[in-house]
Image: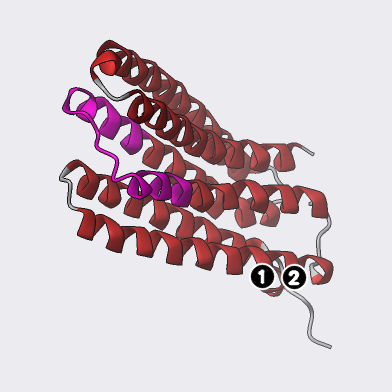
Amino acid sequence: MKSTGYNDIIRKSPFGPIKAHMQVSTNSVDELLKFIEFVVASDWSGATQSRKLISDLENQADELKAETRSLLPKSIFFAVPREDILDLIKLADDIPNTVKDISGLMIGRNMEIPSAIHESFQNFILEAKEITYAAAEAVDHIDELFQFSFGGKAAEKMESLIEKLGTLENTNDQTEITLRGELFKIEKDLPPVDVMFLYDVINKIGELSDRAEQVGHRISLIASR
């Protein structure tokens, strides 16, 4: 009888679709940056096309989430509780969902970004992208952690990635404070409803960064058990 090797286990595990899902998440954040560029340029035709791509990516993410869940009862796991994998994919799925929410809110109102906050706003988005990419790198190494029983150099590498995520998140928090301060200074010159929705978008971008960081911490929790 042919023995079941590590590669066979991985093919039957949800690690594959989880990694694919995270790639879709990074693609959706990349598209969000393009969407914001269209918004800043008041190119609503381009923004509409970009929004469609974001929706398509969110649908792809849903399919991969379902595939992950379908594999769980069949998976061969010795160290990873099913609940941990479910929590991980739920957190990861919040990323494309939040990107879709942000783009939907902005395009629904043809939202203009005041020129006074352009730089900080775009920095805020770029930092959210960096955090998402760092989380994706952590997800990309989860099967390596499994292969080496969550120890050795694989664990050290993951710890380094988690520390990187924390540093990026702290920087992003400071950028959010700066951005909110800049908006506060000009909000009296803007329609109150526009100000309210701008703060809502800022909140959601902050949530996007938080979800990406939480993906990394969930992997760290799995590795520590």
Find residue 155 and report its horizontal and vertical position in percent.
63, 40
Residue 75's disc number: none
Number of residue marks: 2
- Compared with 86, 167 (above or below) is above
Position of the C terminus, as image quadrant, is top right
Q: Look at label 2 and name its amino acid.
A: Ser
The residue drawn where x is 81% and y is 72% is: 74
Q: Nearer the viewer, residue 120 or 219?
A: 120
In the rendered image, residue 100 lying in the magenta stretch gets the answer yes
Which residue type does callout 1 highlight? Glu
Q: Is residue 196 magenta?
A: no
Instruction: Give the quarter of the image for residue 217.
Output: top right
Q: Nearer the viewer, residue 187 or 165?
A: 187
160 over 54 or under it: above or below? above
Q: Which residues are magenta?
A: 99-127
Question: Marks 2 and 1: CB-CB under 8 Å?
Answer: yes
Q: Main secondary structure of the magenta part?
A: helix
Q: Is residue 145 left or right of residue 149?
A: left
Label 2 SS: helix
Q: Residue at x 83, y 68 (%)?
A: 73
The circle drawn on residue 67 is: 1
Looking at the picture, how far across and down is residue 63, in whole percent? 59, 69
Residue at image position (27%, 45%) is 36
Element type where label 1 sits in the image: helix
Tell me how the rendering is colored.
Answer: secondary structure
Q: Which residue in the structure is indicated by mark 2?
A: 70
Q: Residue 49: which quarter of the image?
A: bottom left
